[in-house]
Image (cartoon, rainbow, N blue to C red):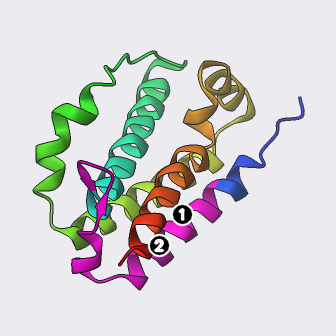
């Protein structure tokens, strides 16, 4: 079976972009608003959270020997907002980077059958660049307003 693994490079590029953004900005800049309620740091913690969710899905799949649905209410973003806001900006950036790197490694090592099974559930679980780039675009636009 030929499996499309182009997501590996897209994930790496998105993680590189995340790393470069975090390195290029001060803690004060990471507090720059992004939209009505978020800051750059909150957007980074949001990315870390959702990457960690996919890591949890992979752990559950490894334990069960199959892909396991783990429903989660999208309201979790609103529920976690005050907690994310309490995380210092540099810690938020570090958390986002380490979560992305850990998930990228796990996804790159997936056996083809597991990869395809996950892909049938959600391409966003495999190609994390789709989620990362969306928020990194918003963050970079906010930082340009400085």
Quadrant in which residue 90 is drawn: bottom left
26 part of magenta stretch: yes
Q: Helix, strand, or loop for circle 1? A: helix
Residue 35 % position (x, y): 33, 52
Residue on which disc 2 sits:
19
51 part of magenta stretch: no
Residue on which disc 1 sits:
15
Q: Are marks 1 and 2 in contact (CB under 8 Å)?
A: yes
Q: CA distance from mark 1 to mark 2?
A: 6 Å
Q: Looking at the image, is 89 positioned above or below residue 51?
A: below
Position of the N terminus by quadrant = top right
Q: Helix, strand, or loop for circle 2? A: helix
Tally of numbered tags: 2
What residue lies at 82% left-to-right and 39% top-to-bottom? 4
Residue 7 % position (x, y): 71, 47
Quadrant in which residue 82 is drawn: top left
Q: Looking at the image, is 49 positioned above or below residue 70?
A: below
Quadrant in which residue 77 is drawn: top left
Residue 143 % position (x, y): 40, 72
What residue lies at 39% left-to-right and 73% top-to-bottom? 145
Q: Which residues are magenta?
A: 11-38
């Amino acid at each position: 079976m030929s499996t499309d693994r182009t997501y590996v490079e897209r994930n790496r590029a998105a993680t590189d972009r995340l790393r470069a953004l975090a390195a290029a900005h001060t803690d004060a800049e990471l507090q720059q608003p992004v939209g009505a309620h978020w800051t750059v740091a909150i957007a980074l913690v949001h990315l870390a959270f959702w990457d960690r969710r996919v890591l949890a899905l992979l752990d559950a799949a490894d334990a069960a020997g199959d892909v396991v649905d783990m429903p989660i209410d999208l309201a979790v973003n609103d529920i976690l907002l005050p907690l994310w806001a309490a995380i210092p900006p540099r810690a938020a950036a570090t958390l986002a980077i380490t979560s992305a790197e850990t998930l990228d490694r796990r996804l790159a090592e997936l056996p083809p059958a597991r990869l395809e099974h996950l892909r049938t559930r959600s391409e966003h679980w495999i190609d994390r660049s789709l989620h990362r780039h969306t928020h990194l675009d918003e963050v970079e636009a906010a930082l340009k307003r400085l």
